[in-house]
Image: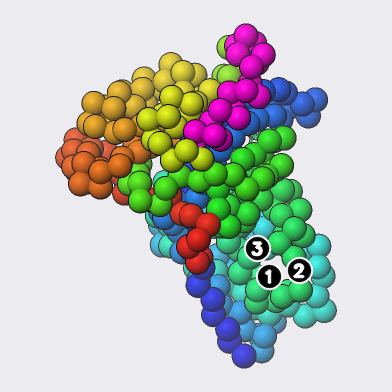
């Protein structure tokens, strides 16, 4: 029998990101506030249990690699390895890609997370979310968040895998996401940060993170703006000046708050006024940038 399931894979933004330590295995410990947003990829998964097992990924964008290195296939293989089945069906995954790649929006991680959820629902209904998150952590540091975050914003500690429900951004905010047209490799961004780590900031890291979570809880964007932070901004702006220019333009074009997401380079403008956000996105598009409108996803919404 053929079965088909369609699932959205949502992009994430970091409203706060600070590296607070480095582990012996080279991974960095962080403080982060993350929320999924309405910008999403779509995965259509078709299984056919009358056919022998095979696993195939197709994507509507030719520049997306669809080989075994794609996090979607790595996630599927990890799930099958953890829960071996006597007979797996034929599985075809069609990916409709909207989230910019290597943009700091967890595009690959969220596709992997959606794959785990959809395949669990189709093939392993008894597997818990916690068990899925354990597999997710072996795929990438952001993948557990991309599962948990569907229930609402989270604070992250450890290397990003210690998650806790956190206050969330208002779903009525309009976000303008601008891709400066460059790509940032996450390991390269961490290496650059290591080269210019600022130890002085570490002393009150806990206090600043708590202040950020309280600010988000207050719902006041001006307060969130003052408390929010991304330790990668300066590093990336000096590696890629164009990213810093987009940041400055976002402010000049009326954003109530501007932050880079993750290790970049996507710049996010936060607007209380949807019309002002649309004008800002149009202005970026007119000057040749890819700009996207989105809103924060909130716990109450059903996704
Ligand atoms: O886990 P993921 O594959 O997304 O991470 C990509 C790279 O980013 C890692 O190989 C590591 O260099 C760096 N990283 C890190 N600390 C984290 C997350 C990622 O150093 N907490």
**Magenta-drawn stretch contains 214:** yes
The residue sitting at the front extreme is: 218
Nearest the viewer among 184 and 212 is 212
Q: Which of marks 2 and 3 is nearer the N terminus?
A: 3
Residue 193 locus on image (x, y percent) = 58, 19
Q: Is mark 3 on a helix, strand or loop?
A: helix
- Is residue 166 toward the left or the right of residue 239 in the image? right
Q: Give the range drawn in magenta.
A: 197-216
Residue 57 locus on image (x, y percent) = 55, 65
Q: Which corner quadrant of the figure contains ligand 1?
A: top right
Nearest the viewer among 89 and 135 is 135
Tell me which corner region of the image, top left, top right, bottom left or bottom right, holds residue 126. Answer: bottom right
Nearest the viewer among 102 and 68 is 102
Instruction: Characterize the local packing of mark 3: few (<14), some (14-19) or many (20 or more) Cα atoms within 10 angstroms.
Output: many
* Residue at image mark 3: 116
- Is residue 139 toward the left or the right of residue 57 in the image? right
- Is residue 211 toward the left or the right of residue 254 in the image? right
Q: State how far apart marks 1 and 3 are (Cα).
A: 6 Å
């Amino acid at each position: 029998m053929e079965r088909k399931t369609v699932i959205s894979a949502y992009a994430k933004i970091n409203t706060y990101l600070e590296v607070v330590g480095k582990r012996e295995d080279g991974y960095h410990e962080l403080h982060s506030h993350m929320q999924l947003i309405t910008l999403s990829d779509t995965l259509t998964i078709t299984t056919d249990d009358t056919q022998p097992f095979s696993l195939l990924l197709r994507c509507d964008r030719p520049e997306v690699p669809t080989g075994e290195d794609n996090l979607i296939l790595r996630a599927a293989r990890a799930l099958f390895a953890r829960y071996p089945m006597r007979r797996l069906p034929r599985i075809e995954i069609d990916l409709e890609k909207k989230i910019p790649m290597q943009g700091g929006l967890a595009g690959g991680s969220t596709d992997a997370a959606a794959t785990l959820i959809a395949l669990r629902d189709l093939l392993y209904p008894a597997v818990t979310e916690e068990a899925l998150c354990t597999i997710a952590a072996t795929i990438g540091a952001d993948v557990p968040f991309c599962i948990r975050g569907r229930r609402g914003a989270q604070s992250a500690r450890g290397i990003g895998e210690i998650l806790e429900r956190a206050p969330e951004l208002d779903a009525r905010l309009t976000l303008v996401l601008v891709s400066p047209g460059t790509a940032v490799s996450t390991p390269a961004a961490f290496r650059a940060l290591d080269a210019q780590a600022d130890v002085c900031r570490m002393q009150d890291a806990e206090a600043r993170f708590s202040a950020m979570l309280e600010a988000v809880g207050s719902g006041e964007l001006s307060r969130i703006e003052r408390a929010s932070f991304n330790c990668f901004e300066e590093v990336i702006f000096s590696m890629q000046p164009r990213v810093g220019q987009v940041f400055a333009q976002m402010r000049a074009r009326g954003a109530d708050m501007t932050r880079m997401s993750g290790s970049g380079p996507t710049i996010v403008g936060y607007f209380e006024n949807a019309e002002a956000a649309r004008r800002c996105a149009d202005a970026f598009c007119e000057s040749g940038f890819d700009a996207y409108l989105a809103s924060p996803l909130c716990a109450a919404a059903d996704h």
